[in-house]
Amino acid sequence: MGANDVGLALITLALVFAGAALIRRFAPQLRALFVPTAVIGGFLALLLGPEGVGRLTDSKGIFSPETFAVWQAIPGLLVNLLSASLLLGERLPPLRGIWQTSSQHVIMGSVASFGQFAVGGAIVLLILGPLFGTDHKAGALIEMSFAGGHGTLAGLGGVFDEHGVSELLDVGLGLATIGMVTGIVIGTLLVNYAIKSPSIPIARQNPTSPDENLDIDHHMPTPDDPPIDENRGMSAITAAAVFLGVSIALGMGMLEGLRWVTNQFDWTLFDQFPIFPFAIIGGVLVQLCAVRFDFDWAVNRRAVESLGGISIDVIIVCAIGTLSLGALGKNLETLLVLAVASVLWSITMAMVIGRRLFPRDWFEHSIAEFGESQGNVATGFLMVDMVDPARQTDVVRGYGYRQLITRPFFGGGFVSAVAVPIIAAWGLPVFTIGSAVIATALAVWGFSMRRSLVKTVPLRQRS
């Protein structure tokens, strides 16, 4: 495979994305459901590839094997760029201010992730394992797929292979796709239900409309975004790419260092460990150095997010487009049961637990966490845009700041990355019970904190 093959694969990918944009443009039903262009593009690539047209015509589909091979490799590479972009360029307030604004979001996001581990583990232990022989390592799939998403799974391919469960990667990617679609669809239904319900006070007073053209592909600017300053000798996008590259390089260096140290003790935990959790730390280190040495003006958050947005779009298209339908068919029971369990858990989190965690504007805060627990960070911001378009609440700051604390750990961080090795080492029963205990303890802590926050959080003034 040469440079021409890579170039052709990228051009073909652009054509697939253009076709998906046209489909979305002329399919009001898809716009009404807020289905992202990237998801449509993924299914279009799947339809035209070896698993779609190829099965019908006994061929490889309309794409060359080289193009398909490049698409299979892209998600595992771009997840590092996506991870490095999560916190790079963020203007950070003092740690105390971050915690005061986001503490309940941190707790809810943590409860959601540990709860997904516990629910997934219990389902595999009690139903999928005894009835269908599902491998116990599938107990980690709900958190990795729904909170982590396509990028996390792409980065964990080596971990699945190392532990002999490579077929779970396709199951996880299928779950991630279901999570993104159901997160948007069910989230929209919950928002409209809240608007019509007299028992739920909500900032938005009118139902959402597809004419607003809300799309998960769009990353929303925040009041803290700095102006784009081109007085740096290079464009903002180029500078962002440079700093992202440095962040990934730092992550690679940290991982290689850990591998060297652990190999001295004959530990193999980090031999197949992915780079992307360390890329998050690399981004934080670059940002801290930028502030410390007074060149943070050169790290433009909007430019960084633009590159991160391109990464997630490409990851989604390639991950869905290269799914193995055969592997999904062999594990259909696992796919469906875990998907239903995850949706039910996310709804419970939003409508029951969230109500008891947030002292003010509980639905607006909860629906953001629902979006992330089913899709990704961008899905959560999409939910915020639906429920509070005028920014009458502090949800954007609370939900955004909590990413600074939880991103290195959950939903594609270290905890997600070590879940399968922990199950392999300690067994699924210990992993499940431990996750349930941690989730319960965090929820109790959050409920007790809410009582003190009620006295300090001001009521939102409404007209």
Image: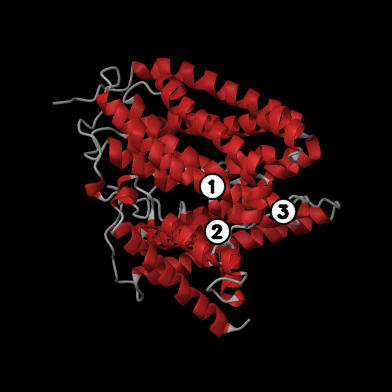
Marks 1 and 3: CB-CB under 8 Å?
no
Picture mark count: 3
- The x and y percentages for residue 54 are 58, 67
Q: Residues within 10 Å of mark 2 (few under 14, many from 20)?
A: many
160 relative to 125, above or below:
below
Which comes sooner in the sequence, label 3 or label 2? Answer: 3
Residue indicated by mark 2: 319
Cα–Cα span, label 1 and label 3 = 16 Å
Residue indicated by mark 3: 166
- The x and y percentages for residue 111 are 54, 29
Cα–Cα span, label 2 and label 1 = 10 Å
Query: Residue at 48% of width from left, 33% of height from top?
Result: 106
**Which residue occupies the foreground of this view, 425 or 163?**
163
Residue 11 appearing in the image: yes
- The x and y percentages for residue 296 are 39, 59
Cα–Cα span, label 3 and label 2 = 15 Å
Extreme residue toward the front, this view: 57
Which comes sooner in the sequence, label 2 or label 1? Answer: 1
Drawn side of residue 218 relative to residue 71, left or right: left
Q: For numbered disc 3, what is the local secondary structure?
A: loop
- The x and y percentages for residue 181 are 44, 45
**Which residue occupies the foreground of this view, 28 or 269?**
28
Please state which amino acid type lies under the numbered disc 1. Ala
Marks 2 and 1: CB-CB under 8 Å?
yes
**Which residue occupies the foreground of this view, 235 or 35?**
35
Mark number displayed over residue 176: 1
